[in-house]
Image (cartoon, rainbow, N blue to C red):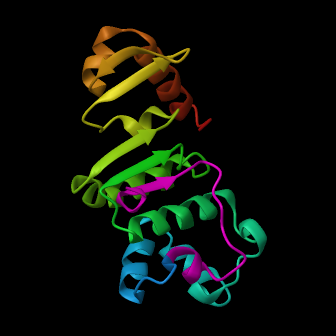
Amino acid sequence: MRAAIGYVPQDTFLFSDTIRENIALGMADEVVEEAVKSAQLKIDIGTFPAGLETVVGERGVTLSGGQKQRTALARAIARDPVILILDDALASVDTRTEEEILKALRRVMAARTTILIAHRISTVKDADQIIVLDEGAVAERGTHEELVAQDGIYADMYRRQHLAEELGEL
């Protein structure tokens, strides 16, 4: 069952090893390269002194929070899981990078069940179903359009985040 699930938490764990080994864990180079592209990590890899062979240090100390999350995302994608769980896995990337990652992930997510857990509306707005939790209970459920029309918790969050983006705060 574990092999069928790919999980990327907000706080990722990386080994004190190369970026390649943190992603591959024995997978073929072609699989790693494709996962790096899907996780939008390729540009960053080009800036590292040894590319994919760069050693990241204990818990990925040499990487930014966003780079750590994208490395963990690439590791999960490389496994080709049936179920992909992204638990606020894009919280450390800016909204523009998040948009690029989600665009690249649409192809990956289309072939599997994907559970996105997020506080940013931009992360979940294209999901087939959005479930809004309030104090541990399901408060609302529907598509982005349905939830905005309901004018409840989700719609309020959407308006606030949309305004913040317009003001350049996010």
> In the image, what residue occupies the spot 55% across and 67% down?
71
> In the image, what residue occupies the spot 33% across and 47% down?
114
Query: Foreground: 148 or 25?
Result: 25
Q: Which residues are magenta?
A: 1-23
Residue 7 among those drawn in magenta = yes
Image coordinates for residue 146, horizontal then vertical, percent: 25, 18
Residue 157 among those drawn in magenta = no
**Quadrant housing the C terminus:** top right
**Quadrant housing the N terminus:** bottom left
Image coordinates for residue 36, horizontal then vertical, percent: 45, 74
Image coordinates for residue 144, horizontal then vertical, percent: 30, 27
Counting the numbered discs, the total is 0
**46 on left or right of 81:** right
Q: Is residue 161 above or below residue 140?
A: below
Image coordinates for residue 100, horizontal then vertical, percent: 41, 57
| Res. 154 image quadrant | top left
